[in-house]
Amino acid sequence: MTDLTSLTIAEARDGLASKSFTSLELTDAHLAAIEAARSLNAFVLETPDQARAMARAVDAKIAKGEGGPLAGIPLGIKDLFATKDVRTTACSKILGNFVPPYESTVTSQLWRDGAVMLGKLNNDEFAMGSSNETSCFGPVVNPWRREGSNTTLVPGGSSGGSASAVAALLCMGATATDTGGSIRQPAAFTATVGVKPTYGRCSRWGIVAFASSLDQAGPIARTVRDSAILMRSMAGHDPKDTTSVDIGVPDYEAAIGKSVKGMKIGIPKEYRLDGMPAEIEKLWTEGAGWLKAAGAELVEVSLPHTKYALPAYYIVAPAEASSNLARYDGVRYGLRVPGRSIGELYENTRAEGFGDEVRRRVMIGTYVLSAGYYDAYYLRAQKVRTLIKKDFEDCFAKGVNAILTPATPSAAFGVGEKGGADPVEMYLNDIFTVTVNMAGLPGIAVPAGKDAQGLPLGLQLIGRPFDEETLFSLGEVVEQAAGRFTPPRWW
Ligand code: GLN
């Protein structure tokens, strides 16, 4: 039998339907792979008993011809998604051994459609980071290495566990979240496909909140088709999230293979950074060429407020985070460090429970929201955000269907290599991705090539609101041209 873990979701779906193997066999193969890959630190909790029980139940359904669209497919779940009766920590000490009595809407839709949960995946603490080094469970290891080197590389973040696990064939797909780039950047670092849907496309209910006006859930998978399959189950209106939008969920998979002839693809000149590695520049040109060869028309566009996106993001996101994280007080969830008064209990708990990066964000956030500075920082950042959104609107109004950019300014870097002395060095990772969150747009990162050291690089496509379908069509063109990339197994 072929190695079941190397199948795509689409292939596994066919194999399960034709009874070539059972979901239990598929699940067991992945559980064994997870056990053999503990050195990657991708999973923070393995749930083998639950996985096998779910697989058996779905096998019985498949036998009766009742399996859903994801029947029997084993997935990993970012530890930011609340899973009923299964520990959920956001990889923060402050949540301790919190076990939610409820299930997030997105994961409940995956189980409704027959998926199997293998366990919870590592991420940056409260999804703050670009390298998965801020997790209280320690860093995740990227299955990719530079050619001829043993240096441990980061998988990107914050959805580093999701990206690493999918790339290393530990799960067939994973849930992830993206506030400023946390789906697309780790996808680019691991040669996986990551989709950040339009704000409001997926319910945020039951997902640990970071910055509520920017957070959005989406899939990480090994192919564009697989990400489309997962998206269909994850998306949808939810009355429990008032920002989720009530429009029908299309059959995203049907967009795969659709002609992109005549589509207008914008190439934003502001994304051509000074000092950008030549390899990234080359990849971008190559990607544009593939789309052109498929019949798309390339047009230069201008997004003039791009340079303000990162600074504005680092005001808006911490502001919202400081407010969202106020609930972790030692009374309601997880960790409690006693004190002589209730005030001291709050202080002690938060001082011990939050890591450095989270504390930095809470301090920045409370500062920019404080009475004397609110107008100068927060209000101003919101105005800049409106201008960034307008840049995109102007571009789409001229008939542009999607925008092509690099996904990241570099390939994966080493553990401990960035951000130690200056956190801004880490923040710069999101230079190409934050604008999309600020504008609420959908974006996809697709593997497109490798750098001189053999590390994967990705391209990003940005779409019109609720037009993820176009991104799947274009993404598949890139995938077809670039091919797929799998890391050699060393772990
Ligand atoms: N790296 C960005 C941050 O640290 C984005 C993280 C994310 O998208 N969750 O805020």
Image (spheres, grey):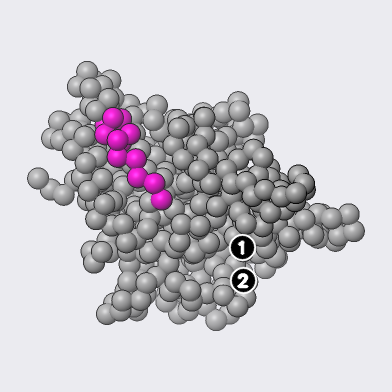
Count of all numbered marks drawn on residues in the image: 2
Mark 1–mark 2 contact, CB under 8 Å? yes
Q: Report the Cα–Cα distance between label 1 and label 2.
A: 9 Å
Query: For residue 5, which numbered disc appears in the image?
Result: none
Look at the image and tell me in which quarter the N terminus lies.
top left
Residue 357 badge: 1
Percent across and percent down for residue 231 are: 43, 39
Whole-percent x, y for residue 44 in the image: 41, 50
Mark 2 Cα shell of 10 Å, populated few (<14), some (14-19), many (≥20):
few
Picture disc at residue 423: 2
Q: Give the range drawn in magenta.
A: 44-55
Residue placed farthest to the top in the image?
Answer: 64
Residue 180 on image: x %, y %: 58, 56
Q: In this view, does 177 lie to the left or right of 168?
A: right
* Residue at image point 55% right, 81% down: 275
The percent position of residue 196, horizontal first and vertical second, equals 51, 49
Q: Does the magenta stretch include residue 249?
A: no
Left or right for 432, reference 83: right
Instruction: Give left or right: position of 64 versus 156.
Output: left
Q: Taking 46 as reference, is 24 above or below it?
A: above
Say which quadrant the C terminus sits in.
Answer: bottom left
